[in-house]
Amino acid sequence: MPDDSTARGFTGLLKLPATTRSPWWELTRRLLMALALLVFTVLLVYFDRDGYRDGTDIRPGHPNGTVDLSDAIYYTTVTLSTTGYGDIAPFSQGARLINAFAITPLRIAFLVLLIGTTLEVLASQGREMFRVARWRKHMDQHVVVIGYGTKGRSAVDTLVSNGTSRDSVVVVDPGSVAQEEAHADGLAIVTGDATRREVLRRAHVESARQVIITTARDDTTVLATLTVRQLNPDAYIVAAVREGDNVPLVRQSGADSVITSSDAVGRLLGLASFSPNLGSVMEDLLTYGEGLEVAQRDLLVNEVGKAPQSLPDQVIAVVRDEKVYRYFDPTVTLLARGDELIVVRPARELPWAPRPGTHNEAGSDEEE
């Protein structure tokens, strides 16, 4: 049997999923509970009816103010609702004790059940409205991920591991499974079809800085890309397609970068089968957090005028005027101010660190 410290450790690690039920189911359950309390109290009063007297005028069939089933129902409703007209009252010692120790707690439970349900509904709705309003107010320059399957989750994990806050990521997906997984990952999600304008507007696509599209069908990707580009001409759109033949079509639809998933996987499979070591290195480059990583960084002042091959970093490409050149391209034989480098470096460095260096170098201002 584990000691107390072990039990506390398990408690800290174990988080049970929250049980989500339909509001109608919850309301029906509580109404049935209230009805059960009402019926139980009626039966309690009726079986002890000899201890009660009706103080109103004696009616035919009610000699000496006796109480019948209808009187028990009436007494129960006015008692549990705390109306208390006083026309029917317990007079025997047993009936008074039952009222004190049974009916009074039932009255409290009945009121808590009904009032608590109302307060809970109002409070939950108020909290949700406040959260949505606050989210809408602060949502700007965020990332919208369309499709939360394997590719979408991997994209979000990569963004988060490189410093993007989960609060600035919004998922758009029509599936209930995706909704559950996004909520479990701490992400906001808009449930709906990403090819519809009103759905994308709920995700504030018009103010997003980046949109990642990972739908299950290429035709859906094309429509989603067109809709996103119409709503936000400035967003950087990255889209994944299954077939390489659809890459030009997605680019024409407005995507800035298109990744062919089937071709990429096929090439990796071919490399791994042809050269296991090469396949292992490529997998390492695509896996963040360990081994080697591909990153983009600024050019340092003391690196201006040098050849890409002469730098300590393993430079594989140079970005100049928003165009990408291979490191051996004659255009970038000598590095110039404003260039950015795409390098291979150890995973201990953040791939997109805000500082200009990659190996604890001083900033460009200090170099000057």
Image: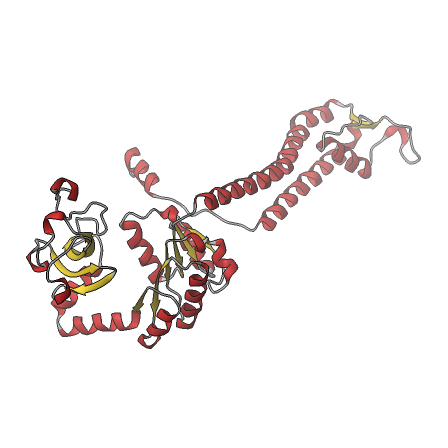
State whether residue 123 is above or below residue 352.
above
Give the residue at x 14% y 74%. 274
Q: Is residue 153 left or right of residue 53?
A: left
State whether residue 15 is above or below residue 92.
below
Quarter of the rendering containing residue 241: bottom left
Q: Residue 99: give x, y in percent of width and height.
A: 70, 27
- Outermost bottom residue: 245
Color style of the picture: secondary structure
Q: Residue 354: give x, y in percent of width and height.
A: 23, 46
Q: Is residue 152 left or right of residue 284?
A: right
- Outermost right residue: 60
Numbered label tally: 0
Residue 220 in view here: yes
Q: Quadrant of the N terminus?
A: top left
State whether residue 264 is above or below residue 298.
below
Front one among 230 and 185: 230
Front one among 342 and 31: 342
